[in-house]
Image: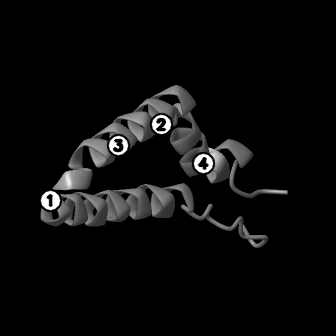
Amino acid sequence: MPGPDLLDVADPLTHLAGAWSLERARDAAWAAAGVLWRLRGLPEVDEEFTERLDQSVGLVSRCLLVPLRAARADG
């Protein structure tokens, strides 16, 4: 039966999984924790950094939720 190739349908997920690195994510989390620790005495800067960190984590999280294209049964 004609239809999209399974690899074509899964391509966005394959690309995303290939770009993900647990080691780099862990390193980034530790770096952010270190910065937050050092900024604890500067409330205004700490708040700004925390807001930006929250936004960037949200962006990455949304990228992880990339939907796969639905395979059409009618080809």
Q: CA distance from mark 1 to mark 4?
A: 36 Å
Mark in front: 3 vs 4? 3
Sequence-earlier tag: 3 or 1: 3
Mark linked to residue 11: none
Which residue is found at the position 28% from the left and 66% from the top? 51
Sequence-earlier tag: 2 or 1: 2
Q: Dots 2 and 1: beta carbons under 8 Å?
A: no
Q: Residues within 10 Å of mark 3 (few under 14, many from 20)?
A: some
Mark in front: 2 vs 3? 3
Sequence-earlier tag: 1 or 4: 4
Q: Residues within 10 Å of mark 4 (few under 14, many from 20)?
A: some
SS for dot 1: helix
Give the left or right position of residue 67, taking residue 26 as reference: right
Q: Residues within 10 Å of mark 1 (few under 14, many from 20)?
A: few
Q: Amino acid at mark 2?
A: Ala
Give the left or right position of residue 37, taking residue 24 as reference: left
Place of residue 61 in the rendered image (x, y in percent of width and height, measured from the top left): 49, 59
Residue denoted by label 2: 25
Sequence-earlier tag: 2 or 3: 2
Place of residue 18 in the rendered image (x, y in percent of width and height, measured from the top left): 54, 33
Residue denoted by label 4: 13
Q: Amino acid at mark 3?
A: Ala
Mark linked to residue 45: 1
Place of residue 63 in the rendered image (x, y in percent of width and height, measured from the top left): 47, 58
Quadrant housing the N terminus = bottom right
Residue denoted by label 3: 32
